[in-house]
Amino acid sequence: MALQDHIDDVESTFLITVGFVLFVIPEPATSALGIAMMLLGIVWWFDEWRADEV
């Protein structure tokens, strides 16, 4: 249960959080980048979750 075991979860959650902050900023370019970062973070998060299940 070391921190190294959960670092991928922290990275994907950080990516989702930063993407949400960029999405909230009322600028079209940052909103598009925020959506892309959130989608990437969610896919990464589910991939890590699926890899733990297998």
Image (cartoon, rainbow, N blue to C red):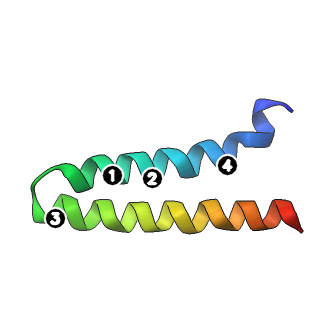
Quadrant where the image shows the N terminus: top right
**Secondary element at image label 3:** helix
Picture residue at 80% right of the left edge, 65% below the top: 51
* Dot 2 crowding, Cα within 10 Å, few <14, some 14–19, many 20+: many
Instruction: Name the image quarter holding residue 50.
Output: bottom right
Q: CA distance from mark 2 to mark 1?
A: 6 Å
When the figure is inspected, residue 1 is found, relative to residue 12, above or below; the finding is above
The quarter of the picture where residue 32 lies is bottom left
Tag 3 and tag 2, C-beta contact below 8 Å? no
Q: Which residue is mark 1?
A: 20
- Is the C-beta separation of discs 2 and 1 under 8 Å? yes
Mark toward the viewer: 4 or 1 = 1
Q: State left or right for residue 9 relative to residue 1.
A: left
3 or 1: tag closer to the N-terminus = 1
Image spot of residue 42 (x, y percent):
53, 63
Which residue position holds label 3?
Answer: 29
* Distance from Cα at disc 4 to Cα at disc 1: 18 Å
Residue 8: numbered disc: 4
Q: Amino acid at mark 1?
A: Phe
Callout 3, which amino acid? Ala
Residue extending furthest toward the right? 54
Q: Amino acid at mark 2?
A: Ile
The answer to which of marks 4 and 1 sits earlier in the sequence is 4
